Image (cartoon, rainbow, N blue to C red):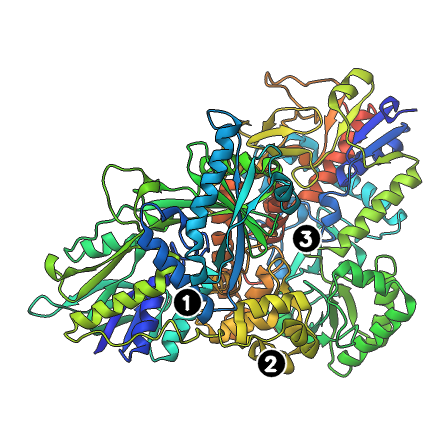
Amino acid sequence: MSVLDAEILVIGGGMAGVAAALSAVEAGRRVALVKRAPGATSMSTGAFDLAPHPRGWHLAKPDRDPTQLECLEALVRASPGHPYALIGRANEAEYLQEAFSFVLEKLEAGGLPHANFDPRDPGHHAVTSTGRLRRAASSQASHVLRDFNPDRARIGVVRLARCLGGLTGPPPMGGNVIEVDWPSSKNAPFLLPADIGKLLDEEGESRRFVEIVVAACKGRGFSHIVLPPVLGVFRTREILNELEEATRAVCCEALGGEASLPGIRLENALRRSLERAGVTVETGRTLDGAEVLERRGGPVVLASGRFIGGGVARRQGSMTETVFGLPIHDGESYLDDQPAEMLSCRSYRGPHSLFRAGLRVDDLLRPLDMGNRPLHETFFAAGSVIGGYDPHVDGCGLGVAVVTGYRAGRLAAGLEAS
Amino acid sequence: MVDLIIVGGGVNGTGIARDAAMRGLSVVLIEREDFGVGASGNSSWMVHGGVRYLLTDPKVTRVSCRDSGYIQKIAPHLIFRIPFLMPILPGMPGGRLVDLAYAYGTECFLGVYDRYQPLKNGKQSTRLSPEEVHRLYPAVRPDIVGAVTLDEYGIDAYRLCVINALSAAEHGAKLHTWTVVEKVLRDEAGHVRGVIARDRLTGDVLELKGRAVFNATGAWSPRFARRQGARVEMRPGKGVHVVLDRKISNYGVITKAVDGRDMFVIPLETSSVIGTTDDDFYGDPGALEATHDEVAYLIQAASHVLPSIERARVIRTYAGVRPTLHTYGIDESSLSRDHRIVDHASDGAPGMLSMVGGKLAAYRMMSEEAVDAVETVMGGSPTSCRTHVQPLPGGTTPLPNPIALAEEYGTPPWETSRLVHRQGANARDALELTRDEPALRAPICRCEGVLGAELVWCIRFEHVRRLVDLVRRCRLGHGPCGGARCVRVAGSLFARERGLEQKKAEREIDVLLQELWKWRRPALDGAQLAQEELTRGLFCSAGPTGSDGQPGSGA
């Protein structure tokens, strides 16, 4: 049977598409998911962010942080075109809790435990790839900086001499850098985090690694040890446990940067959770929107991403949605053939309408035509293919993916229709 | 009191500084940003012989060829050969016979150019059949009549400025980058006697007395002269280049734009570059950006000969303003590429000189003429110039073998070969830094092959005042990743070397990101947009910068 004949069809296999597929399965539907290739989700830092701290992530007084819900409310106030603003329910703590808990449980069942999410709390502490402290709504359990008290903590930061783009920031956390030369042969190649992760998945290699790190940290009285996010694709918890046992310090990984290993772990967990849920998955396939429309009667969820995912593209000056050729909107107006310099401004940080480009949807996540009518009753969009927000500046890529994906899946299954 | 104050740190300013300092003059050089930020660094990076000027300006061709040969001797590490193909396209009115006659004519024309090739160690031209062309360069359109080759050279034009400045400093010159001239001083007789300048980073005001002031500010020179009541006649021309993400061939290829102008696609370092536009420019050269229509014009011209370029990934643009000599009533491409040195004694600013026009390839000879003129203005007669025989810093031969260095220091070989290309004989000294700090063996920029050791070497010894200066020292941020991989690491090394606190380090990173954004913005399209989204994710998702992320005490 072709995927086009499935009861519910999801296009896109990043966080939003998977959340949609899983929530539709949960509602008792049979789901097929078509995926071209890993996209932005596979480059995730490992943190799930709901909304940015209104004054920036870098917190001067960590004990007086706003809650995640307060961050979200500030974001919605500042950008009324944001997908969170469209979905009234996204502002309700109960709904956020429901969507996040659902997705995080599925990821844990897929082998990747995450920190608990609570919208009424500021989130947990984590360390960025540049060695700075921040909060996250949730993240992979290995990133959680547990029992952190800024007044008492004594943090050591491990840098691997052979790791490309490990922890790179200004002397992090006050400068207690522990240089670790591993693998230590003089002409060993420089490795990407993913290559190091693969090495550390071998037990012998990880034992040597743990010995070297423990020896380097010995007697320095660290309460917390932060490592680069390279501790295996699969054996992360074991390696951290061994380190904690030997050092008596809280050990965690920093969040990923470019070439992120946590992103690869997340991608793996998504695949496994789809398998467990019995979703039919077809990878490496690009659908022709016209064929989809012709063949299908049942619901479709479009979760094809933005520029990285390939759901939205600009080709020789024309903006387009790539599967169905839908018009592209930035939250204020339609974008078609304007030159790049008119869709952006001189300041790097923006705001740039080019990076808010995507579909315009209604409160039921249905893409709208230029006359403001939904294109189809059961055609939904989820994740960053929806326009009107800049996921990178707003720091809410996975948050929007979880909330809109969860909702789109339930809407496609016939739940939640107001 | 110094002998000469030079304003402008492009190839002319730094070239004049070197020559004057080597002749024993005391020299101060003032540059409002960094070396090569104007037309020099934003040029086509070719020290070509100027085959284009053979019919109209044979003197420019001869001088360019001769000086291209000298540059090969004084900076052998920095130079790279670019063999060109000049494809003969079909479709001349009159049919195939005329096409063939045109091919013959081109061959004869380049045969004349061959007479200049020995001056710059170039190979003689050759006529190639279509099959031979496609074997060398499969992307060339299938219906060509043939091609004729010609041999040219390229150079890292930023570094050419930098090493001229460093050589001047070795000979006693004082360098002030990020310093702007606020006022030119005169004595009672109205003679120019120095300048008042302000350091833009520290705010310090410098009062510099000098016997002569040289205006080598390129596109800014008419404005600089005007403020002294003097005149520099110039017809500035904007030139834009488009950069592709990879070196698509080892050969340069010449093509024609829609308006018939000659254009080229050349392999340049790790990328391919399409150039160049030439349009009269009336704006502020300090606020220069390429535009989408210039990008489209260049891609159209390139795809005329290389059709697949339409699908290539454009990673960035760059733009500069040529300080061309003024002539009224002809089009931009026909303007002479000759140069002129103006002594402002006759128009109200005795003691001040300006330079207009010229080519990158002829900078050394122009600097020589300029210093001759300075010595004359100072009441002496020209002394002897040695800039054509004395190697520039790093140019002492034999150059080190990169593979042997890589083995010896445990550094990756490709990055080490890029280090030898940029640093020449100084590569070993740079690698010595890894003895004390083995972490500096790591490649920081994987696009352009920059080792930690090279970055620290530049920061310590190459007059780097801001993080963004590294763009001009070692191609930081030039590659397809747009700085995604290197900017933070380079920023933290810079902050460490300069002892900057975190806020200032973040500020330096912002300035660098802004500079790179200016290059990329006009060309954001296709696959590059995905990279841009990823890069933004890395640099913008942390929210507003500048707030303090340190967790306080205990550390």
Q: Nearer the viewer, mark 1 or mark 3?
A: 1
Q: CA distance from mark 2 to mark 1?
A: 30 Å
From the image, tell me which residue sits under label 1: B70
Task: Report the quarter where the N terminus of chain B lies.
Answer: bottom left
From the image, tell me which residue sits under label 3: A122
Residue A79 location, x and y as percent? 56, 37
Q: Could you tell me the amino acid type at mark 2? A: Glu
Q: Which circle's residue, 2 or 1, is located before the other in the chain?
A: 1
Q: CA distance from mark 2 to mark 3?
A: 48 Å
Position of A396 relative to B61 (above/below): above
Q: Could you tell me the amino acid type at mark 3? A: Pro
**Rendered residue at 69%/33% (across/down):** A311
Q: Do marks 1 and 3 both belong to one polypeptide chain?
A: no
Q: Is residue B193 left or right of residue B453?
A: left
**Rendered residue at 69%/69% (across/down):** B412
From the image, tell me which residue sits under label 2: B432
Label 1 marks which chain's residue? Answer: B
Residue A218 location, x and y as percent? 78, 81
Q: Do marks 2 and 3 both belong to one polypeptide chain?
A: no
In this orientation, which residue lies closer to the viewer: B476 or B124? B124
Q: Could you tell me the amino acid type at mark 1? A: Tyr
Q: Nearer the viewer, mark 2 or mark 1?
A: 1
Badge 1 crowding class, 10 Å Cα cut-off, few under 14, some 14 to 19, many 20 or more, is: many
Q: Nearer the viewer, mark 2 or mark 3?
A: 2
For label 1, the SS is helix
Q: Is residue B27 left or right of residue A242?
A: left
Pointers 1 and 3 in contact (C-beta within 8 Å): no
